[in-house]
Image: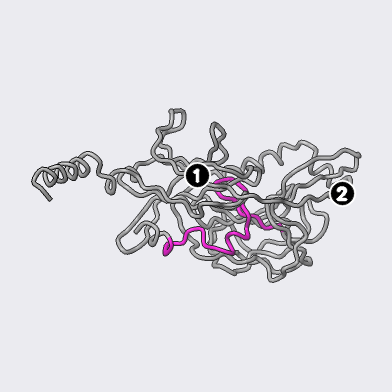
Amino acid sequence: MNRRALLFGVFFFLITVFLFPQDNKNPRLFLIPEAPRPGEPVTVILQGEDAQSAGLQAVLLRGQDRFSKAAFFDCDLGEGKSIKAALLAVPSTVLPGEASVRVERGKAGEEAAFLAEKPLGIARRDFASETITLNESLTRIRTESDPQKTAEAEQVWAIFNRTGNSILAEGYFRAPVDSTRRTSHFGDRRVFRYSSGKTGTSIHAGVDYGVPKGTRVNACAAGKVVLARNRIVTGNSVILEHLPGVYSLYYHLDSIACREGQILAAGEMLGLSGATGLATGPHLHWEIRVSGENTDPDTFISRPVLDKKTILEIIK
């Protein structure tokens, strides 16, 4: 190498290090997985100096359409490493195709600052359809306005919209009952046939297990009981908080065997199945919410959504 080439190489190296310190300052963004299906969660990992800023959120978008968002939280990986993580859901209504995850910073009411963005390919997924006939009593529960029903819905949404820093569950989740018999599946497109002859539609937010009244219902993972009470629509209901923004829901119970504020271990009994609230027969409705979005519970059984070992391998 001649002297001129050597000097040029040194000059280019100094420019790169001092003006573009990629490894230390610029944020590095990782997505797990990179090709989720509608209804599945995505773990968003942010690394770098800018990742230490407060008020960060991950946004799933396609063009001008913003589908979901999630706040970042601190995640200690061990080995002296920590990162910012967000658990972001792909809504079951999103069409397949190219999308992206953007990291933004800003306070409510302020224009968000762009920090990083990475493409995300959303795979195709088909959902089943079903028609449910309701008698007069169940029709009233679903269609009639009621201040108490509104207040109960607002209370639950206030829970879903919280994102703390508590990581109570790591690893795989488990099914809440021993039975494998399912009467409805996640994402089913439903048509309700009312006693009046009219119809209404909805998307099933969880999984229904067709189990007899009095079947033991267990916590799907370690978590804190943030709701344990009777509600008009969902009957005797329990909600557990497992990770920042991640909640599991157990509806239509015959009885509740836990109290609000209690910490349950994975597999610990929280109640018995029943047919309370808007239920056409005995069953357990099991649901998982991620930053407010309903998410396929089977994903949590098949893979850890906060797999620290995998994250360490990726960021290295």
In the shown orientation, is residue 304 left or right of residue 30?
right
Identified at 64% across, 66% down, the residue is 175
Q: Nearer the viewer, residue 253 or 21?
A: 21
Let me know if residue 228 appears in the view. no
Residue count near mark 1 (Cα–Cα under 10 Å), binned few <14, some 14–19, many ≥20: many
Q: Amino acid at mark 2?
A: Thr
* Badge number at residue 70: 1
* Badge number at residue 217: none
* Disc 2 element: strand
Let me know if residue 112 appears in the view. yes
Examine the image and state in which quarter residue 111 appears.
top left
Task: Relative to 265, say whether 187 is above or below.
Answer: above
User: Bounds of the magenta span?
Assistant: 285-310
Identified at 40% across, 48% down, the residue is 29
Identified at 72% across, 56% down, the residue is 185
Identified at 80% across, 37% down, the residue is 144
Alpha carbon distance from label 2 to label 1: 36 Å
Task: Report the residue marked by disc 2.
Answer: 133
- Mark found first going from the N terminus, 2 or 1: 1
Q: Nearer the viewer, residue 18 or 131?
A: 18
Q: Is residue 25 magenta?
A: no
